[in-house]
Image: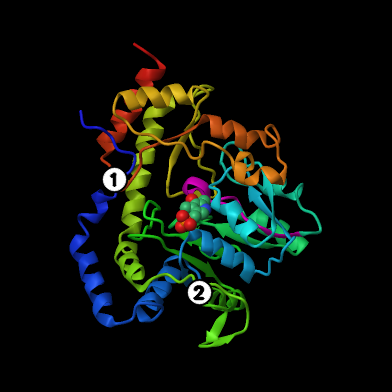
């Protein structure tokens, strides 16, 4: 039997090759290689898709988070509440601003932050909360937004894994004060290289963000604030415009794969195998399909032996990384994140993956767990 890859980008790019090549030609011939109409067209289309008023393209997802924090007014020494279980970029954005990440353990069932847990971590120095819509599942935003407004705190959503997801029927894109996106190739909407964006309904935040990404400048050679150079390339914007038109279809295919897993793993689910649960408010886009098991390493090795690729998102939480040992969170201090890093396993899910392949993965997993 054919090996099952974890992700196969050629499954979507091969079919779109002619369209992508034509978009490349258009930009190559336009003479506009930084900012300009191609980028603006993508920004408008992506804002519309996200049900947000504004969008600004930046160099990558980490810059989207960092510049959004700065645009929201984060100052050195401010505290920013982040999930303990996330990709390290969520934390790096905070420390790049010389602010202090304050980690909070997520909810065990949804993998996302809850207002109840956040509330205990709020201090007079808290400036921003960053809920991460991890694995494509939206966090329960309304209670978080209410809590934030009660305390005069801003909310920046990390939506790097949630393109197209909905919260209570409305797209992720402008529930919070700003939303950061990554177009890293493996994301639900990925460029053919690095890319990122920020969406928001707040004109002041977006004005600052546009300056920050472009040398702190609104008019050439006038620098009102200290900015950086981080703009989404028109070439990548052109690739993303082609791919955006297919995003809903691809997310539907991911959803279908997730439901095959859900249906066929339900009979072996229990204390030794926990399946992702979808809360009532969420319409997730299955960036990853993540199961939990105390036998995770055994399952991964046995699946690999049968040519099925899986990955671990993420094997070591940020607070235990050498980069952040100085923050002073020893092993044991964030038990949920630590248990997750030992137990989570991501099964293959990507557009173009055949449902029969997902069925094979589910049946193989069942065989490993309950030998005949
Ligand atoms: C991918 C990712 C980022 C960073 O995006 P890059 O474009 O790779 O810089 C940030 N947060 C989360 C949750 C991500 O998955």
The answer to which quarter of the image holds residue 226 is: bottom right
Q: CA distance from mark 1 to mark 2?
A: 32 Å
Judge from the rendering whether residue 233 lies leftward or rightward of residue 339; answer left or right.
Answer: left
Q: Which mark is residue 54?
A: 2
The quadrant of the picture occupied by the N terminus is top left
Residue at far left of view: 18
Magenta region, residue range? 126-140
Residue 62, percent across and down? 52, 59
Judge from the rendering whether residue 322 lies leftward or rightward of residue 305; answer left or right.
Answer: right
- The residue that mark 1 highlights is 8
278, above or below 275, in the image: below
Neighbour tally class for label 2: few under 14, some 14-19, many 20 plus, Cα within 10 Å: many
The answer to which quarter of the image holds residue 21 is: bottom left
Residue 37, percent across and down? 36, 81
**Which residue lies at the image location 59% right of the left edge and 77% below the top edge?**
208
Residue at far top of view: 372
Magenta stretch containing residue 132, yes or no?
A: yes
The answer to which quarter of the image holds residue 69 is: bottom right
98, above or below 292, in the image: below
């Amino acid at each position: 039997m054919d090996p099952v890859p974890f992700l196969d980008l050629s499954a979507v790019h091969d079919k779109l090759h002619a369209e992508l090549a034509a978009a490349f030609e258009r930009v190559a011939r336009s003479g506009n290689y930084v900012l300009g109409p191609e980028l603006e067209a993508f920004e408008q289309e992506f804002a519309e898709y996200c049900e947000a008023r504004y969008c600004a393209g930046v160099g990558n997802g980490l810059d989207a988070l960092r510049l959004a924090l700065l645009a929201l007014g984060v100052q050195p020494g401010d505290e920013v509440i982040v999930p303990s279980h996330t990709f390290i970029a969520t934390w790096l954005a905070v420390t790049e601003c010389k602010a202090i990440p304050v980690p909070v353990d997520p909810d065990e069932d949804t993998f996302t932050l809850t207002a109840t847990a956040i509330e205990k971590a709020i201090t007079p120095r808290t400036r921003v909360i960053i809920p991460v819509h991890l694995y494509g599942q939206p966090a329960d935003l309304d209670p978080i937004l209410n809590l934030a407004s009660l305390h005069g705190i801003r909310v920046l959503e990390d939506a790097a894994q949630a393109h197209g997801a909905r919260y209570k029927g409305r797209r992720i894109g402008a529930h919070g004060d700003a939303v950061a996106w990554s177009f890293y190739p493996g994301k639900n909407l990925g460029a053919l290289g690095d890319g990122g964006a920020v969406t928001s309904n707040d004109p002041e935040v977006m004005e600052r963000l546009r300056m920050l990404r472009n040398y702190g400048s609104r008019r050439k050679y006038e620098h009102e604030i200290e900015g950086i150079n981080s703009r989404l390339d028109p070439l990548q914007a052109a690739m993303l415009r082609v791919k955006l038109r297919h995003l809903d279809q691809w997310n539907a295919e991911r959803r279908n794969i997730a439901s095959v897993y859900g249906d066929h793993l339900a009979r072996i689910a229990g204390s030794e195998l926990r399946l992702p649960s979808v809360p009532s408010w969420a319409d997730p886009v299955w960036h990853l399909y993540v199961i939990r098991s105390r036998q995770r390493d055994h399952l991964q090795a046995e699946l690999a032996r049968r040519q099925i690729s899986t990955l671990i998102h993420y094997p070591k939480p940020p607070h235990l990384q050498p980069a952040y040992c100085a923050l002073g969170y020893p092993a044991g201090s964030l038990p949920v994140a630590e248990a997750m890093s030992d137990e989570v396993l991501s099964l293959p899910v990507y557009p173009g993956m055949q449902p029969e392949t997902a069925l094979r993965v589910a049946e193989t997993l069942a065989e490993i767990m309950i030998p005949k």
